[in-house]
Image: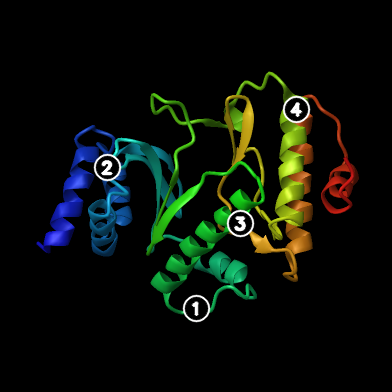
Amino acid sequence: MDSKISKADDILQKMLSEKRLKGVEDRRVGSEVFDSITLKTLYKLSNSGYIHRLNGAISTGKEANVFKGMDENDKFVAVKIYRVTTSDFKKMQIYIQGDPRFHVRTTNKRQLVNAWVNKEFRNLQRACEAGIKVPKPIVAKNNILVMEFIGDEEGNAALPLRQSDIQNPEEVINKIIYYMKLLYQEAGLVHGDLSSFNILIQDDEPVIIDISQGMTRDHPISEDLLNRDIDNIVKDSKKLGLKISAEDIKSKIIDLKS
C-alpha cells in the first residue's frame, strides 16, 4: 500500500475503531467517502497538523460527510469530505458556471468537486469578513474542507435550528435576517439554500452553514435564490410562532431598513 494511503488509513481506522461505521451500509458509505485520493489528502493534512484524528460523523449526506476531528493541538475541528462518486454534478455546474471566480472544465468530475470545495472555503471567508457567524474556514485541499467546529467544549456538535429548543425565537430570526443582509450587502453573496437545516444554534445564537452553493450578488439567478431563502425563513419563522412577511424580510436585506 502507498505509504501516504497507509498513514491516512490509520486515521480512518481510529474512527472505525469507535464503531461509528459498523453496519454493511455504513461500511459501503465509508468506502465511497475514503477513496485513495481522499486518503492521500488526509495524509497531507495530517502531516501539516490540520487533522490529528477523526472522532466520527457529525452529519452525513448524499454529497458530503462532516466529521468531528482534532488537530495537532487537540482542538476540535470539523472535517467536511465531499464524495466524488455521488455528488450532484449537474447542480454543481449550475452554481459554478457564471461565477467569475472559477474557471473549471465541468466535464472533469474531480476537478468540479475540488472547485466546489474551494468555492465553499472562499464563501466562508467572505462571510467571516462581513461579520457573519459561520464556521471559520481553516484549509481546503482537493475534496476536503477543514473548518471551525461548532459545538461545546466537550465536543458535542451544535444542533440545527429545526432540532433546537429556541428560547428567544424573535431574537434568533432577527439575527438570521441581519446575517442575510450582511451576506448580501457586505459579502456580496446570496446563500441559496438557507433554511432551518443549514442554521445551527450555538449558545442561543444562529450560525450559518453549508454555503458552498452561495452565489455572487450580480449572478443572473441570485435574486431567485434570495427569494427562495426568504421564503424558507418565512416558513421557519411561522413554525416558531412568528409572523413575518417575505416583503418585510427583503426590504431589510436590500433596502437596509432596521
Residue 108: give x, y in percent of width and height.
Answer: 42, 77
Using residue 187 as the reference point, say whether residue 24 is left or right of it.
left
Looking at marks 1 and 3 on the same chain, the residue that comes earlier in the sequence is marked by 1
Quadrant location, the C terminus: top right
Tags 4 and 1 touching, CB below 8 Å: no
> What secondary structure is found at the residue carrying circle 1?
loop
> What secondary structure is found at the residue carrying circle 2?
loop
Image point (47%, 30%), residue name? 151
User: Callout 4, which amino acid?
Assistant: Glu
Residue 197 visible to the viewer: no
Q: Which residue is mark 3?
A: 126
Mark on residue 72?
2
> What secondary structure is found at the residue carrying circle 4?
helix
Tags 1 and 2 touching, CB below 8 Å: no
Q: Which residue is mark 4?
A: 171
User: Callout 2, which amino acid?
Assistant: Glu
Residue 23: give x, y in percent of width and height.
Answer: 27, 38
Decide: is 127 above or below 114: above
